Amino acid sequence: MKRVVTLSLVGLMFVTALASVPRNAQAQGAGLVSSILNRMDRNRRELQSLRSGVVMQKYNAQIRTEELYEGELQYVAGTGTNMKLRVDWSRPAREHLAVAGGQYTLFRPRLNMAYQGSTKSAGKNTKVNNVLGFGLNITGAQLKSRFDVELVGDGILYGNLHVTQLKLTPKGAAGYKYAEIWVDGSGMPVQTRVVERNNDFTTVRLVNFHRNARVDGSAFSLSLGPGVKIVKG
């Protein structure tokens, strides 16, 4: 099967895949949800930058197959177009994505091609912002106004990290059924899943992440050689 990494997949970033959290039907209540959203708000305010490994799983419910991707992520906090993101995929193929100033560049070395455009005019590719938006760029008040937020339960994620799982069901029209977030004790969204209307889903998880790590500003400008074909999106 041909494996292709697109901005839409990256956008569905910060979500399982490789681990699951047991559902706790008794762990319900608006007070508990508000407490978790408050922790997420505090994390958002305090988080200036992030360096992390990233694992992404894309599951096709129709043919019951999955594609796995591994790479490294760099992030600098900001509102709107001030947010900066870079993802360097190493498996199954090398690809590089940089987002800054509301513009993206996706470079595929094996094809010697780069795709460039605005995150606002790139159609479904703009989901690159939604990934971060579910947990890092949106306030608790905004989450509650845009989604029905349900406390699913808590448990241990990939071996040793205690997390709480939230389900976000859009109150209005959306291009997906719902999203889920796994939040650690500090309010950091360490895993996110987006479930499509056809039950396909994409999960992204952060591994070995470092909050407020040093991130070089030059990382968000990809250096393309003179022979690279540029495709405007």
Image (cartoon, rainbow, N blue to C red):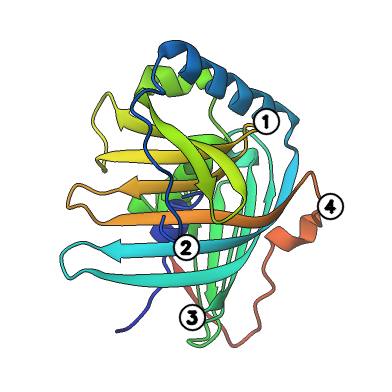
Describe the element under mark 3 as helix, strand or loop: loop
From this viewpoint, is residue 165 visible? Answer: no
Describe the element under mark 1 as helix, strand or loop: helix
Please report contact status of discs 2 and 1: CB closer than 8 Å, yes or no: no
Q: CA distance from mark 4 to mark 1?
A: 17 Å
Sequence order check: which comes first, mark 2 or mark 4? 2
Q: Which three-letter amino acid code belongs to the residue tagged 3?
A: Pro
Question: What crowding class fits label 4: few (fewer than 14 Cα within 10 Å), some (14-19), or many (20 or more)?
Answer: some
From this viewpoint, is residue 62 visible? Answer: yes
Q: Which three-letter amino acid code belongs to the residue tagged 4?
A: Arg
Q: CA distance from mark 4 to mark 3?
A: 27 Å
Residue occupied by mark 3 = 92
Q: Please indicate whether residue 145 sits to the left or right of residue 14 in the image.
A: left
Residue occupied by mark 1 = 43
Q: Which three-letter amino acid code belongs to the residue tagged 1?
A: Asn
Residue occupied by mark 2 = 56
* In the depicted structure, whether residue 29 falls above or below residue 48: above
Residue occupied by mark 4 = 214
Q: Please indicate whether residue 228 sits to the left or right of residue 118 in the image.
A: right
Describe the element under mark 2 as helix, strand or loop: strand
Please report contact status of discs 2 and 3: CB closer than 8 Å, yes or no: no
Question: What crowding class fits label 1: few (fewer than 14 Cα within 10 Å), some (14-19), or many (20 or more)?
Answer: some
Q: Position of residue 120 (x, y in %)?
A: 44, 45
Which is more toward the observer, 26 or 108?
Answer: 26
Sequence order check: which comes first, mark 4 or mark 3? 3
